[in-house]
Image (cartoon, rainbow, N blue to C red):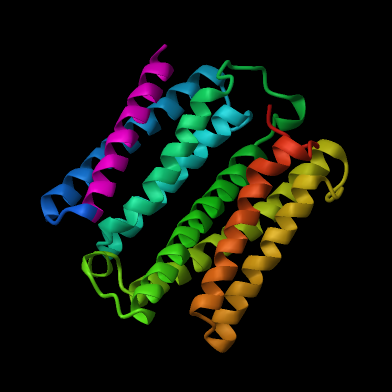
Amino acid sequence: MMTQIAFTLTTVLYVGATLLYLACLLRNGSRLQSLASKVLMVGFLAHCLAVIHRFIAAGHLPITNMHEALSFFALSIVGVYLYFEHRFKVGTMGSFVVPFALLNIIAAGMVPTELRPLNPALQSAWIYSHTILAFGAYAFFTISGCVAALYLIQSHFLKKKHLGQMFQKLPSLDVLDEIGYRCLAFGFPLLTVAIITGAIWASQAWGSYWSWDPKETWSLITWFIYAALLHGRLTTGWRGRRAAFLTIAGFLIMLFTFIGVNLWLPGLHSYT
């Protein structure tokens, strides 16, 4: 009961935060942006409470079905976004990130929420390191995808010499580039270690480090895309529109790895 109350409160607060962040694009004023940030922070705390209470009720990390996974994904996105908002003072970026987190939390509320016994294969301490690292990487890649979209919007404004109110409100290309790089620098190592710990866990659970399960295959594809992005940035200083398009492509493939594989390519890693 307490979990559901906290989850409902989280949804309401995320709706409020989304509306406030979108309003920041239409109206001037630091107070509105500050209010949006505060509402989102309260929603994040309510979300943490919901996850913690479900953790206590289930007796394991709540990421073992689609409801829990979508909820934890939204929590990770908001947590990472709040870090970047505080670090770079980019409140208007929330107009693009927070609605996506809201969609995940709404989707989480639309699928079965009942607690189920943990599959024996998942009863391992590796569940904590592997899944938390993976969700952390997914959150950073989500932010990088939103940043890439913003980069394309800002570069379009510059190309058309349309430097109006929207252009002034959105983060500069340099700031967006820096945030995008940091997302890659944080997210790629997290995904790498998540894949390694997942292989160790798979060996213990199923007797094989790698079985080319659909989730494993698409995780590797995602890894190669972000490896190429990071390599290009570190060796040739690759950035700009082409890098932004590849970042968005990586984000979409990451989403397919996380959600699409579970819906259309069932395997050992499928959520129910």
In this view, which residue lies farthest toward the top?
1
> Does 179 sit left or right of 186 as displayed?
left
Magenta-colored segment: predominant secondary structure: helix
Across and down, in percent, residue 221 comes to: 73, 60
Q: Is residue 21 magenta?
A: yes
Q: Residue 92 sits in which quadrant?
A: bottom left
| Residue 61 appearing in the image | no
Across and down, in percent, residue 176 comes to: 38, 70
Q: Is residue 111 above or below residue 258?
A: above
Question: Which of these two is toward me, 227 or 97?
Answer: 97
Q: Is residue 88 above or below residue 53?
A: below
- Residue range of the region highlighted in magenta in the rendering: 1-25
Residue positioned 36% across, 75% down in the render: 173
Residue positioned 85% across, 50% down in the render: 212
> Does 242 sit left or right of 267 as displayed?
left
Across and down, in percent, residue 207 comes to: 88, 41
> Does 217 sit left or right of 135 as displayed?
right
Q: Residue 86 sits in which quadrant?
A: bottom left
| Residue 32 appearing in the image | yes
Residue positioned 24% across, 38% down in the render: 39
Q: Is residue 118 above or below residue 20?
A: above
Question: Which of these two is toward me, 112 or 53?
Answer: 112
Residue positioned 64% across, 52% down in the render: 194
Across and down, in percent, residue 95 comes to: 33, 51
Q: Is residue 1 above or below residue 197?
A: above
Q: Residue 123 sits in which quadrant?
A: top right
Question: Number of marks in the image?
Answer: 0
Quadrant location, the N terminus:
top left
Q: Is residue 139 magenta?
A: no
Quadrant location, the C terminus:
top right
